[in-house]
Amino acid sequence: MSDHQNQPREYDAVKGGQNLIPVNAAVLGSIAGQTFQFKVITVNNRGGIIKTKQRQAEYLSENLGRGVSLEMVCIPGGTFMMGSPDNEQGRRDNESPQHRVTVPTFFAGKYPITQAQWKAVMGNNPSNFKGEKRPVENVSWDEAVEFCNKLSQTTRKTYRLLSEAEWEYACRAGTTTPFYFGNTITPDLANYNGNDPYGAAPKGLYRQQTTDVGSFPPNSFGLYDMHGNVWEWCSDKWHDNYSGAPTDGSSWETGKSEYRLWRGGSWNLNPWFCRSAVRYWDRSANRFNLIGFRVACVAARTP
């Protein structure tokens, strides 16, 4: 098989399949051909599993020291419809207008940054709900950016927060439903306030705290905890809707807003806040025990 055939291919999230445009190997940095396997589920309108599929994804592993590593999954570039349709339960006007966005290949954290990973880089643990494998929370946008900067200096790669478009693209992983596993959600699938059902799903457990990352099914890209557990800071400034938004997957930095984006919902909120399209905001210096973050990585830098 030729080198051209061995290169990963771009994923067309609108069509839900693969096209034949090879990704430039330089974009992938030092991936070293590592892969992992996982199961992806699809649920019916009551949250029951109706389909299971075996998938695999490429990743790189970063040694943070102290026996702690950071796994970064390769997210193949593609095009998707960002935002929610008018008939989606729980949607808000700030999720519109729906628009087509093309996202280049990048790496995204397999999980939100954990407390062990935060401590390995920053030397402390600000979290309210303690646990090495739980997501770090009580961190501001400013502190999340500082983490990325320190990690970049140590690893000689460029780490940063995901843009809002990258986040939604990575969360959807080719789906157009409210959640990456289907039209509804249950506490067996994510960590949120299960007292309020979504759609035809029944009520369920409300854990009232964070859970270890990786406790629930991943999406088709191999990412975990994109729905619930903790909100995740994104890099963009807040805008009230998508009018004038970038269509190239980049962070939206124009405007005078003092707010930054959250995505994904959290352990204490109703299920409609956990939808793929939901967006929320706060000041960059604020911190809460329901907000953490995930990191992105671009190609490795040369010495």
Image (cartoon, rainbow, N blue to C red):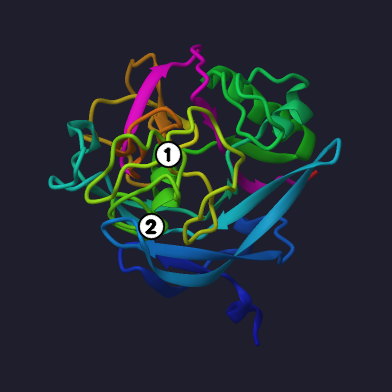
- Amino acid at dot 2: Phe
- Amino acid at dot 1: Leu
Return the residue at label 2: 181
Q: Residue at x 65, y 39 (%)?
A: 158
Mark 2: which secondary structure?
loop
6, 137: nearer the viewer? 137
Q: Residues within 10 Å of mark 2 (few under 14, many from 20)?
A: many
Q: Residue furthest right?
A: 66
Residue 243 position (above or below residue 286): below
The tag on residue 205 is 1
Magenta residues, start to end: 277-302
Q: Is residue 159 left or right of residue 292?
A: right
Q: Residue at x 59, y 44 (%)?
A: 111
285, 37: nearer the viewer? 37
46, 155: nearer the viewer? 46
Residue 74 position, x and y percent, is 58, 57
